[in-house]
Amino acid sequence: MSNNLDVIRNLYQAFAVGDIPAVLAALSPNVHWTEAEGGPYGGVSTGPNAVLENVFMKLGGEWDGFSAVPSEFVADGPTVVALGEYSGTYKATGKSFKAPFAHVWKLDGGKITSFHQHTDTAVHLRPMQP
């Protein structure tokens, strides 16, 4: 198992238990984090603080039980792809969702330099509608 794959597996484990400081520690200072355009948090965040504010704080504040559970990993050099499923309940509506995802991670020197999310944004947005 490659070191890059270990970094990504550990990141999902930290996220699963709510250890956001460990997740942020895995990111390079200039990480480019891309959420799928058209999704609730679509766009690019640069740097760990921007990822915290634009993604993780919103997920924690707006969702109950939000999870991103990988089921398969594909690693090739500096790239790791994780395939899995999102789920959660939107607090404001009480509606839940499940949607598949593909995450493309790029690493350099054991740190995550980029993240690119691929998911069905329409499914992710449904529980947010009144």
Image (cartoon, rainbow, N blue to C red):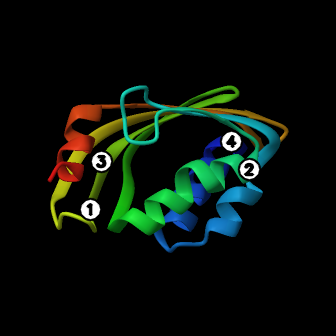
- Vertical position of residue 44 compared to residue 29: above or below: above
**Dot 3: what SS?**
strand
Between tags 2 and 4, which lies in front?
A: 2
**Dot 2: what SS?**
helix
**Dot 1: what SS?**
strand
Which quadrant holds the N terminus? top right
Whichever of callouts 4 and 3 sits on the residue coming sooner in the sequence is 4
**Residue at x 71%, y 45% (from the top left corner):** 3
What mark, if any, has residue 85 been given in the picture? 3
Q: Are marks 3 and 1 in contact (CB under 8 Å)?
A: no
Amino acid type at image mark 1:
Tyr
What mark, if any, has residue 90 been given in the picture? 1
Amino acid type at image mark 3:
Glu
- Vertical position of residue 108 compared to residue 72: above or below: above
The residue pinned by badge 4 equals: 4
Residue 79 place in picture, x, y as percent: 62, 28
What mark, if any, has residue 48 been given in the picture? 2
Q: Are marks 2 and 1 in contact (CB under 8 Å)?
A: no
Amino acid type at image mark 2:
Pro
Q: Are marks 1 and 4 in contact (CB under 8 Å)?
A: no
In the figure, is residue 89 to the left or right of 59? left
Mark 2 closeness class: few <14, some 14–19, many ≥20 residues within 10 Å: many
Give the CA distance from mark 2 to mark 3: 23 Å
Give the CA distance from mark 4 to mark 3: 21 Å
- Vertical position of residue 43 compared to residue 41: above or below: above
What mark, if any, has residue 12 been given in the picture? none
In the figure, is residue 28 to the left or right of 88? right
Q: Is residue 6 visible?
A: no
Whichever of callouts 3 and 1 sits on the residue coming sooner in the sequence is 3
Give the CA distance from mark 2 to mark 4: 18 Å
